[in-house]
Amino acid sequence: MLMEGVSVNLAENFNSHFKRGINGTYYQISRKHSQRYADEFAFRRNTRKFNNQERFDLLLSSSIGQRLTYQQLIN
């Protein structure tokens, strides 16, 4: 089933940006937190047409009621 607006090129483009972002921003990532890195780059991709203020406001509004403790992060 072909979804409108989705192509192999789009997936390859995202993967390319993801790999360059990981190699350019972070020296190494752990398998344990790899989903968080993927979520970060997906957020960046999905908000690429936003300016910095709009992206920041969206991030803050979506974090209301969310909590990540240091203990959850290291376990």
Image: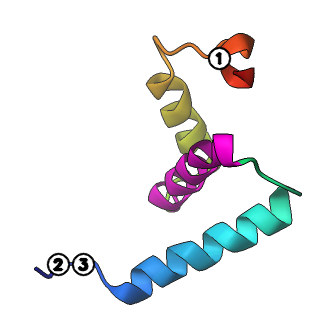
The structure residue drawn at horizontal position 56% and vertical position 13%, both measured from the top left corner, is: 67
Pointer 2 residue: 4
Q: Secondary structure at mark 2?
A: loop
Depth-wise, is mark 3 or mark 1 nearer the camera?
Answer: 1
Q: Which residue is mark 1?
A: 72
Which of discs 1 and 2 lies nearer the camera? The answer is 1
Residue 9: x and y in percent read: 42, 88
**Identity of the residue furthest to the left in this view:** 1
* Residue at x 60%, y 42% (from the top left corner): 36
Q: Is residue 34 left or right of residue 74?
A: left
CA–CA distance between discs 1 and 2? 39 Å
Residue bearing the label numbered 3: 5
Which kind of residue does numbered mark 2 sit on? Glu
**For marks 1 and 2 on the same chain, the one whose residue lies earlier in the sequence:** 2
Amino acid at circle 3: Gly
As drawn, the label of residue 18 is: none
Magenta-tinted stretch: 31-48
